[in-house]
Image (cartoon, grey):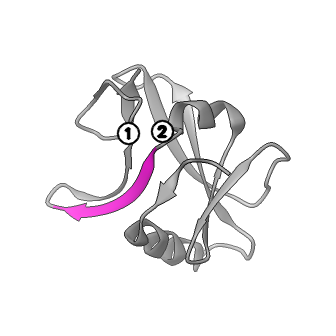
Amino acid sequence: MADITLTERAASRIHEIMASEPSGSMLRISVNGGGCSGFQYAFEVDRARQDDDVMVERDGAAVLVDQVSLQYMEGSVIDFVDDLIGQSFKIENPHAVASCGCGTSFAL
């Protein structure tokens, strides 16, 4: 089991997103090289769970994370925020030593 936590707000938003997607769809979060801080999070809807994917669940909402991304996200909290700058998923990553204003890239 991955040491990644989904907040109640994130689970609720994932349910809203998946309601308009084909049955069996899940949110996939991955870490890619790039972004203004070195690494960036990518969010996509995926219907195929790979054999080495880890599934994080809360209240029936599911997030898939591949093994490579998992090493960068271990211990993270996935939240959903709705503030003055807009709505977005926010990942509180204990391994990130720096992040940028966009909230989707980070440095280790």
The image shows residue 29 at horizontal and vertical percentages of 57, 47
- Left or right: 22 with respect to 28? right
Q: Any magenta on residue 8?
A: no
Say few, some or many: other residues with alpha carbon within 10 Å of mark 1 (under 14 / 14 to 19 / 20 or more).
many
Position of residue 51 in the picture relative to residue 36 (left or right) = right
Pick the residue in front: 2 or 83: 2
Q: Pinpoint residue 84: horizontal percent, then vertical percent.
A: 14, 60
Name the residue tied to disc 2.
41
**Is the magenta region chiefly helix, strand or loop?**
strand
What amino acid type should be assigned to the residue bearing mark 2? Tyr
Region rendered in magenta: 76-83
Queried whether the magenta region covers residue 81, the answer comes back as: yes
- Residue denoted by label 1: 104
Binning the other alpha carbons within 10 Å of mark 2 as few (below 14), some (14 to 19) or many (20 upward) gives: some
Quadrant housing residue 71: top right
Tell me which label, 2 or 1, sits earlier in the chain: 2
Q: Is residue 38 left or right of residue 23?
A: left
